[in-house]
Amino acid sequence: MRGKMKDWQKRKQTILELMNNELYVPMKEKELAILLRVEAADRPLLKQALEELLEEKKIQINKRGKYSLLDARTAAKNADHLVGTFISHQKGFGFVEVDGREEDLFIPEGKINGAYHLDTVEVALLPRHGGKRQEAKVVKILERGTETIVGTYQKNRSFGFVIPDNRKLAEDIFIPAECSKGAVDGHKVVVELTDYGNDKKKPEGKVIEILGHINDPGVDILSIVRGFDLPVEFPQKVMNQAQRVKEEVIPADLEGRSDYRGLTMVTIDGEDAKDLDDAVSLTKEGELYHLGVHIADVSNYVQEGSALDREALSRGTSVYLVDRVIPMLPHRLSNGICSLNAGVDRLALSCLMTIDQKGEVVDYKIEETVICVDRRMTYTSVKKILEDKDQEERTAYADLVPLFKDMEELAAILRRKRKKRGSIDFDFPESKIVLDKEGGPIAIKPYERNTATKIIEEFMLIANETIAQHFFWLELPFVYRTHDIPDPEKIQKLGAFLSSFGYYLKVHKEEVHPKEIQKLLAKVEGTPEEAMISRLALRSMKQAKYTVDCTGHFGLACEYYCHFTSPIRRYPDLQIHRIIKDWLRGRLKGRKQQHYEEILPQVSHQSSRLERRAEEAERETDKLKKVEYMENHIGECFEGVVSGVTQWGIYVELPNTVEGLVHVSKLPGDYFYYDEAAYEMVGRSTQIRYKLGQTVKIRVENTDRDSRTIDFGIVGGEEE
């Protein structure tokens, strides 16, 4: 590999010479690969070479993804200028996220130059000071990123102002009396910004919607929905199109499909699931398993470029909030003709795999099919059959018990194979928040991973890998799910910390293999420091994303991975289904191939961004309801585990997954300081230490719905 990289360092010069030729026209990465005769295996090296040339300010890339030379004058002018997204902080300073940079740029309070949260800005780098984070100043606002804000209205005599829900926004919004829309104290409102303000003047806006009073049921979640700009209602054009979709499979749709309606298959999902997009079948022949993963053919009903498709792309994913689901597709499709409901004919894309005793896929085929699910099973029911050996449940599903036993057997084989190659499983507790009719939290229950959930997990993983590998070797445009190797600096820091506990993390040439992380998690399992080390390992990982380049999935320790199995709720899966069908029908060439090459980079980028938005919204609604739940437990004591240590205090997580902060000023009996290298809070005179994974007893002292925070205090003082 090192020799290849040296060759590519030389070829960087070849790329520059090519672009310097007067006959050169800007080209995309794939066009350059063809022109330079780059082998498929070396495509990642070409990508790296182009990224390095971009970083070195020798070439540039336009909005269409085409590369060209950066002329000397432009390069000199822009050497210290970068473009990124401004992220504000409530204390007045901010950060700028720049694509391709591992670390954000710090923008001091006096260097913001009128930038507002999420603005696209041009920044100039400032001189470095020691080992501090790189600082910069905003020199130009290229595009405003925030147009509306959700917050709480407060009325004054002749005007009003809105306190933003988003705590990253440092200032309240001034509302002239004539722009209040009749809002009163305590109303949750949506404000349209009319003036972004400056150093001497507050931002100004007008109320465009009143969501309800802060204490009205459901308004708290609705405020988060609007704050993240999540689309709730479908446009009428989209609903009209959904209404025209037939509720049953029509004969014309069966043409050219393989008929698997006679094959025994089931869906296995949660009790409250309505959008069933995956069914599984399994037969055993000697030592071989014939596994079928059958996925709803949503693309048959959502045509590319239609109103339904444009809306699905703009949503990117279904969003699962604590009290509601905001679907990617209208319910008529997601719960109707696209859902693999039992006892009715449904169209599917099926990945049929033959798997041996080692978990190897020795043969497979991908087909357009028509299926009919025999039974709609739940995780609970299958768990009762396999784990609990519940006689009543086994009798009820007697004809399917042998099938579930074979599924359990195959899933165990696939899991062993994944473990062997180094696939990492972070098994942190997740929770389900139970609400009453008014939307108030009445219980927080742990989600249980059991044999049934693991069966579906393994079957979906192997199908996703098989599909991704197939299209990688066809060298066709595709959307992959990738997870990059961790940042070397974070791994070094993790390794140094682990050594103090007597653990060793093997690192080769500044890179760690996922198997080493897996070995580490196995070693710490059951130890007092398990939670602490697991969390630190997870924090050293990068975020998975959608890309058009197959760079592998670090966490799963596999070279090829994609999302194929959930087209009802994820747009990348729907996009992949279209690609598969075009390939199956012999259409994936010429203009069609070029079309995908042009649109997929944007589809991947947008899907990754919208996935992050959904995850943030889901986290915020969970945090809000957990705060509301703990309001009824103020003054009570609980045992928890230190889940985070920062300079401002320690975070403690309770068994029900609720997390609260013990502020450094409330740590008992001493003046405490943060030892960053050891992730510990240390008493300066007593040397009492609070570290990740440590068990502590806390008292619930305060809650704040607005900031969605919970304050804890340590019980027991120095003795604790």
Image: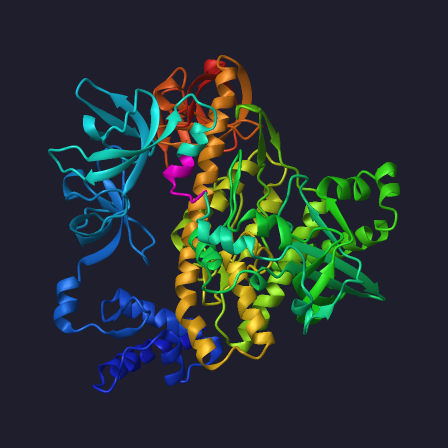
Q: Where is residue 56, by image quadrant? A: bottom left
Closest to the observer, 573 or 437: 437
| Image vertical order of residue 634 relative to residue 25, above or below | above
| Image vertical order of residue 445 relative to residue 459, above or below | above
Closest to the observer, 697 or 79: 79
User: On the rendered structure, is 287 left or right of 155?
Assistant: right
Residue 256, given in percent of the width and then of the height, sits at: 68, 74
At horizontal 27% and vertical 22% (from top left) the residue drawn is 154
User: On the rendered structure, is 193 left or right of 502?
Assistant: left
Q: Where is residue 313, by image quadrant? A: bottom left
Instruction: Please say which color scheme the image uses.
Output: rainbow
Closest to the observer, 711 or 576: 576
Residue 230 is one of the magenta-drawn residues? yes
Residue 494, given in percent of the width and then of the height, sits at: 45, 46
* Quadrant for the N terminus in the image: bottom left
User: On the rendered structure, is 710 left or right of 152?
Assistant: right
Q: Give the residues in magenta.
A: 224-232
